[in-house]
Image (cartoon, helix red, strand yellow):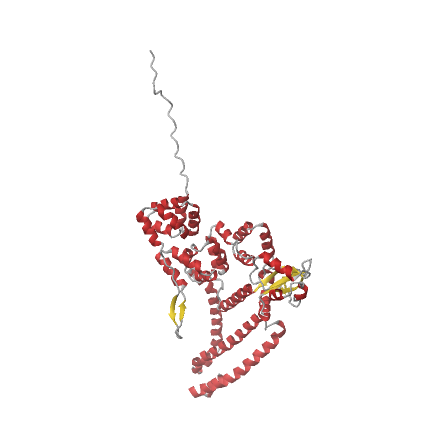
Amino acid sequence: MNSIDPNPSQEPKEPLEPQAHARTESDFVIDALTLGKNKRVRKLLGRMHPAKIAALLELLVAGQRTALWQQVDATLEGRILPHLNFNLSRQLAGESGDDLPSEQATPGQSGGVHPQKVNHLTAVREALGQGKLKRLGKILQRMHPAKVAGMLEGLPPLERARVWSMVDTERTGKVLTYLHDEIRTALAQELDPDDLIASIETLELDDLVDLIQTLPPALGSQLMQATNGGRRQQLESMLSYPQDSAGGLMNMDAIEVRASVKVSTVLRYLRLRETLPPQTDMLMVLDRKGYYQGVLRLSALVTADLDLRVADVMQTDVEAIAMETPDTEVARIFQDQDLVSAPVVDAQGRLIGRITVDDVVDLIRDESDRTLMQMAGLDDEADMFAPLLVSSRRRAVWLGINLVTAFLAAWVIGQFQATLTQLVALAVLMPIVASMGGIAGSQTLTLVIRGLALGQVQKGNIRVLLNREVGISILNGVLWAVVIALLAVAWFGDWGIGGVL
């Protein structure tokens, strides 16, 4: 009788290859935490269930756990703590109780109490040193984007990167607009593409144009592609104008009205809009073909009779600025006329946008900084904490030019070596002559730079100004030559020295 083998022999099976471990949200969080990508950590935590975050916290070692807890949003803390064991829950709850630095009241001279301003830079560096990133985030949240930008520029690169990672994504775009170009580019490149795109959604068009123009072309193109169709068309139109022209300064958010409509209709239209563009002090009056006709000031609109038409209360004497007008001329127009905003028109007289005073103030500040830095041969966009070799190379050019001029001056002095040998006292007096000449040159240079900035120095008056400065130089030269000669004679008792001077 044949027996049946319960375990018949079978062909040996190929060993199964180990399946690749599927990466979980926790893995991505740990990777981002290790790389210091705090914005990415917060984004990932926002997608996770509180129980999963609690489980991850219990798995991490103490240092990583503390770093991760610093990235947990305050609104999630209460939902995460119940999922933790008792001891860990108490420990993390204690770390959440960081108080923000507050303004302290100090008695004034008149007996009153005045708030003492908080030094944000000191508070931020203290929070960094203590590893209290949650407190750091709260401090940054209370600061204006312009102050955040100024503080970032005042931090060394490593601290700057850590602070930048704690700036909320929705505020990073506005902070970038206040930074100098070099630091702006570096910090923008540290952001994830998705975060950078999300940060520009709330930016005004003119700020977005400035940002795109200063970023690397690839990054700027990426931002352009991420904007929607209508907004992209406006961006492309604004980017087509030179950056240093009225077209490059303008925004395309002007409110347009017709001269034939009633005041009541305009007021009803404004109520439907609910909000007005920033620095709106006037509405632009156009005809049906878009040609600029004048402005309707809000002060006149709200005080006018409701049955009047716009044509009855509008102003026609407000001149529009041509799109190709240089930005320095635009700044001068705003200064001379005390404008808050101004219309911009194309070559045919059609309205294409408006310029607001905030952009003009930024322009004036940038021009002042650029002039001041260039007088010392420095780059106005340079990072104060740039690497030593980079900073040294930038300054070396101007120092080299100065060395050449110094050798030229030494060569000129060398031509009078025989005279100096006979009258050694002249060598003692040489610094006086050089100092007087340097001060006189600085005075003229300062006046000319100021005149150029204010538009007072132009082609039509250059010859008159040149003759005037030459006359002043001759008068002062004769006057102080006599004074120095008399002092030299009194000092050395030699009329020959006085005659040479």
Q: Position of 495 compared to 321: left or right?
A: left
- Counting the numbered discs, the total is 0
- In depth, the one of 310 and 2 nearer the eye is 310
Specify whether residue 158 is in view: no
Seen from the viewer's position, the closer of residues 320 and 413 is: 320
Q: Which x, y percent locates residue 198?
A: 50, 51
Position of residue 79 measured from the top left corner of the image (x, y, whole percent): 39, 48
Residue 324 position, x and y percent, is 62, 62
The vertical placement of 138 against 330, above or below, is: above
Q: Nearer the viewer, residue 28 or 500?
A: 28
**Residue 129 left/right relative to 197:** left
Question: Left or right: where does residue 472 sit relative to residue 292?
Answer: left
Considering every residue shown, the one lying at the far left of the view is 87
The quarter holding residue 290 reads bottom right
Looking at the figure, which quarter contains the N terminus? top left
Taking the view exactly as shown, the residue that stands out farthest to the top is 1
Q: Return the x and y of residue 124 as percentages of the image width and height.
A: 39, 60
The reply to whether residue 475 is in sight is: yes
Write down the quadrant of residue 336 in the picture.
bottom right
